[in-house]
Image (tube, rainbow, N blue to C red):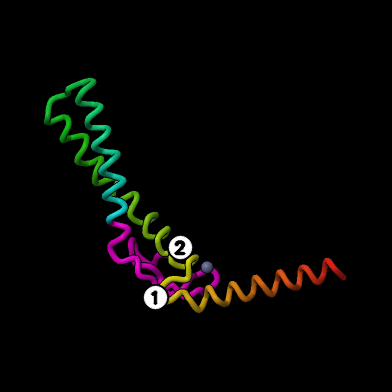
Amino acid sequence: MFRAFLKVADTCPHCGEELYHHRADDFPAYCVIVVVGHVIVTLALVVETEFAPPLWLQAAIWVPATFGLSLALLQPFKGAIVAIQWAAGMHGFERAKRARDAAASAGLAGGAGAKAA
Ligand SMILES: [Zn+2]
């Protein structure tokens, strides 16, 4: 669903679902900051209390780890947040959700009728 690292494609390349009206904005970055901060700070505190390595070694480990983990998590978090907006019918996804819900209830009615018949 991405046409670049963090650019969501206008439509899904598989099913054509419109994605251009998502509003992920800065929320993926906030989530990544919270997760990466908790992971890195916890690990840094454990390493400091257990091994007390020199500061240059701490910096050599935690700075690249912070950047790497942040870059690794940004795209999955953005995809998940756009997916949550799609599933909840938020922002521009209301019309698609109404269509899915109508199709599902029509399918349920048809399924129940088929079982009864
Ligand atoms: Zn699709």
Q: Which residue is nearer to you in this view: 62 or 36?
A: 36
Spatial CA span between label 2 and label 1: 12 Å
Q: Residue at x 43, y 72 (%)?
A: 19
SS at circle 2: helix
**Which percent across, then down, holds residue 62?**
21, 37
| Residue at position x 21%, y 20% in the image | 51
Tally of marks: 2
Q: Magenta stretch: give its range.
A: 1-29
46 over 31 or under it: above or below:
above
- Residue 90 colored magenta? no
Q: Amino acid at mark 2?
A: Ala
Q: Which residue does the numbered mark 1 point to in the structure image?
A: 21
Please state, as top left, top right, bottom left or bottom right, where the N terminus lies in the image. Answer: bottom left
Residue 97 spot, x, y in % from top left: 53, 73
Q: Amino acid at mark 1?
A: His
Q: Examine the structure image and report whether residue 12 is included in the region drawn in magenta.
A: yes
In the drawing, does residue 3 fall left or right of residue 48?
right
Q: Are marks 2 and 1 in contact (CB under 8 Å)?
A: no
Residue situated in front as seen by the camera: 8 or 105: 105
Identify whether 80 is placed above or below 64: below
Magenta stretch: helix, strand or loop mostly:
loop
Q: Which mark is residue 83?
A: 2
